[in-house]
């Protein structure tokens, strides 16, 4: 799958791609999970189907230790059969009206996963559009937060994370992300195309 849009930020890249996140090879894939870490539909279902039962077996061991995984946080498993080393299971906020801390919690999903990535020497990481499916976060606001949080994090951290792929499942979501990524031209050293 080719990268549809790239923003260069120092030595790092923010890429936007459209497609199925389970088919994209990276060091770490982020999942849009729930607080029970119980699996579900959407991208969570796709990740467990493609990765196989080993991922849920690891979550079964983690659950008694951590209890619930609160919104804005993430836990780490291996990636089973997925083309990755890790899955970071991030829990996005359920959207109510935007006035219940949702923006900070969504931002935290991205920054927590980038922190987990840096701690594990992850060089490439992919994110789905967290919270914008079943959890109802408006795509325009969520894309703005995703793009800005990743770009600012890459600008402020010099390594090891080099490539962040934001993956959208639909054409219309991809166009929204692209509009927000184009605003980064002021922040970025170079953009292609
Ligand atoms: N690759 C990339 N993106 C995908 C894929 C895929 N294979 N499949 C769906 N998406 P959602 P949430 C997009 O609902 O809103 C689950 O049941 C989808 O189009 O997966 O955070 C969990 O267990 C949308 O843009 O996650 C939780 O209970 C985005 O992924 C709950 O849903 C996120 O949609 C989490 O809800």
Image (tube, rainbow, N blue to C red):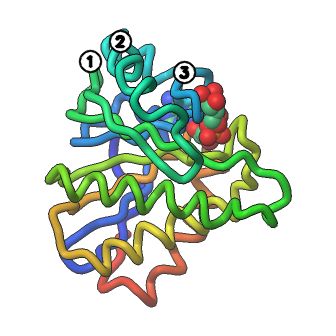
Which residue, given by chain and number where applicable, does mark 1 sit on? 81
The image's mark for residue 52 is 2
Image position of 18 (left or right of 79): right
Q: CA distance from mark 1 to mark 3?
A: 19 Å
The residue located at (17%, 68%) in the rendering is 159
Residue at 22% across / 42% down in the picture? 27
Question: Is there a contact, CB below 8 Å, between mark 1 and mark 2?
Answer: yes
Q: Residue at x 68, y 39 (%)?
A: 133
Q: Quadrant of ligand 1?
A: top right
Label placed on residue 38: 3
Residue 44, image x, y percentages: 52, 27
Q: CA distance from mark 2 to mark 3?
A: 14 Å
Q: Which label lies toward us, 2 or 3?
A: 3
Q: Mark 2 or mark 1, which is nearer the start of the sequence? A: 2
The local crowd at label 2, few if under 14, some if 14 to 19, many if 20 or more residues have their Cα within 10 Å, is: some
Disc 1 or disc 3, which is closer to the eye?
Answer: 3
Residue 76 spot, x, y in % from top left:
33, 37
Mark 1 surroundings: few (<14), some (14-19) or many (≥20) residues within 10 A: some
Image-quadrant location for residue 138: bottom right
Residue located 71% across and 64% down the image: 101
Depicted 83 relative to depicted 156: above or below: above
| Precedes in sequence: disc 1 or disc 3 | 3
Query: Number of labelled discs?
Result: 3
Disc 3 packing (10 Å; few <14; some 14–19; many ≥20): few
């Amino acid at each position: 799958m080719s990268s549809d849009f790239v923003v260069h930020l120092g030595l790092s890249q923010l890429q936007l791609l459209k497609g199925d996140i389970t088919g994209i090879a990276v060091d770490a894939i982020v999942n849009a999970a729930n607080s029970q870490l119980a699996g579900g539909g959407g991208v969570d279902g796709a990740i467990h189907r493609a990765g196989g039962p080993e991922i849920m077996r690891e979550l079964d061991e983690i659950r008694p230790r951590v209890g619930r995984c609160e919104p804005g946080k993430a836990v780490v498993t291996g990636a089973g059969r997925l083309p990755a080393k890790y899955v970071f299971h991030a829990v996005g906020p359920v959207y109510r009206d935007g006035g219940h801390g949702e923006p900070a919690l969504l931002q935290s999903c991205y920054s927590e996963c980038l922190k987990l990535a840096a701690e594990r020497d992850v060089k490439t990481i992919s994110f789905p559009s967290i919270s914008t499916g079943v959890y109802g976060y408006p795509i325009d606001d969520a894309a703005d937060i995703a793009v800005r949080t990743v770009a600012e994090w890459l600008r402020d951290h010099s390594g090891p994370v080099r490539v962040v792929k934001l993956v959208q499942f639909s054409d219309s979501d991809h166009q929204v992300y692209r509009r927000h990524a184009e605003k980064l031209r002021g922040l970025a050293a170079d953009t292609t195309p």
